[in-house]
Image (tube, helix red, strand yellow):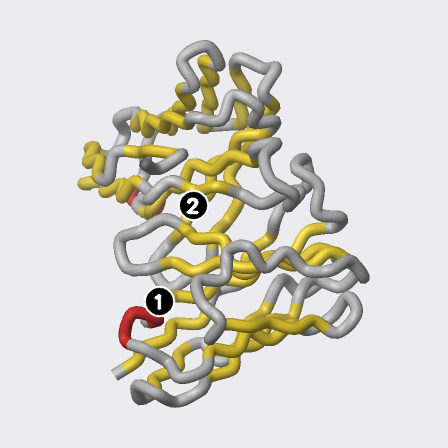
Amino acid sequence: GEDVEQSLFLSVREGDSSVINCTYTDSSSTYLYWYKQEPGAGLQLLTYIFSNMDMKQDQRLTVLLNKKDKHLSLRIADTQTGDSAIYFCAESGDRGSTLGRLYFGRGTQLTVWP
Amino acid sequence: GAGVSQSPSNKVTEKGKDVELRCDPISGHTALYWYRQRLGQGLEFLIYFQGNSAPDKSGLPSDRFSAERTGESVSTLTIQRTQQEDSAVYLCASSLWGGGTDTQYFGPGTRLTVL
């Protein structure tokens, strides 16, 4: 099965909050990331959280980490139409020999309605 | 400074042909990664280069895939005898030193279509 799982679609109205969820399996993950991918563009790092933190806030973005349940979420406050994109959850586990190799979920397509 | 660049941005080829994709990492980044993104899927790790160490090729799906990197600069990913299932976006990323705490910066990708 997949190591990182996300729901595939999320629709919200402009101005509402969006919450994108992710679960992972590797308990040795050191860092967890959220990347944003806009149409035709590469992945843009949005934010990351170290595994010994529960929460990280960065302007409109709030990341919550429940390490016990291996659950990560990204909350976007006051969602705007420009936030419409695919959001990828990724973890950098401590497995294998490749330092820094990231394991990605399939991405959540966020659609923001005006 | 410039980000990670990739060329070509789009490549259409016929089944059985060879293709070569190029990645220019951020200057000074010692680590370079190739990923593949199939339609509707997450990113699949392909190969990793770090400095002068032997590359980690554990993600390459078959022996038709190979990659090279000259020092800490340009990398090329070569796919021989392309198949339709090779159609995907190929993404390159670079980071300063390749550790798990290191941020990876991605290029815009090369969209490969095999007819």
Q: Quadrant of the N terminus of chain A?
A: top left
Which residue is pictured at 18% across the width and 40% down the height?
A: A113
Q: Residue at x 29, y 44 (%)?
A: A81
Badge 1 marks a residue whose secondary structure is strand
Residue A8 lies, with reference to residue A24, above or below; the image says below
Residue at the spot x=42%, y=36% of the render?
Answer: A89
**Tag 2's secondary structure?**
strand
Q: Chain of mark 1?
A: B
Residue that carries the numbered disc 1 in the rendered image: B88
Residue B76 coordinates in the image, percent (x, y): 60, 75
Distance from the alpha carbon under mark 2 to that under mark 1: 18 Å
Find residue A39 and report its image quarter: bottom left
Q: Are marks 2 and 1 on the same chain?
A: no
Q: Which residue is mark 2?
A: A36
Look at the picture and state if B24 lies above or below A27: below
On the image, the x and y values in percent for residue B6 come to 55, 72
Q: Position of residue A72 (x, y in %)?
A: 42, 23
How many numbered circles does the render carry?
A: 2
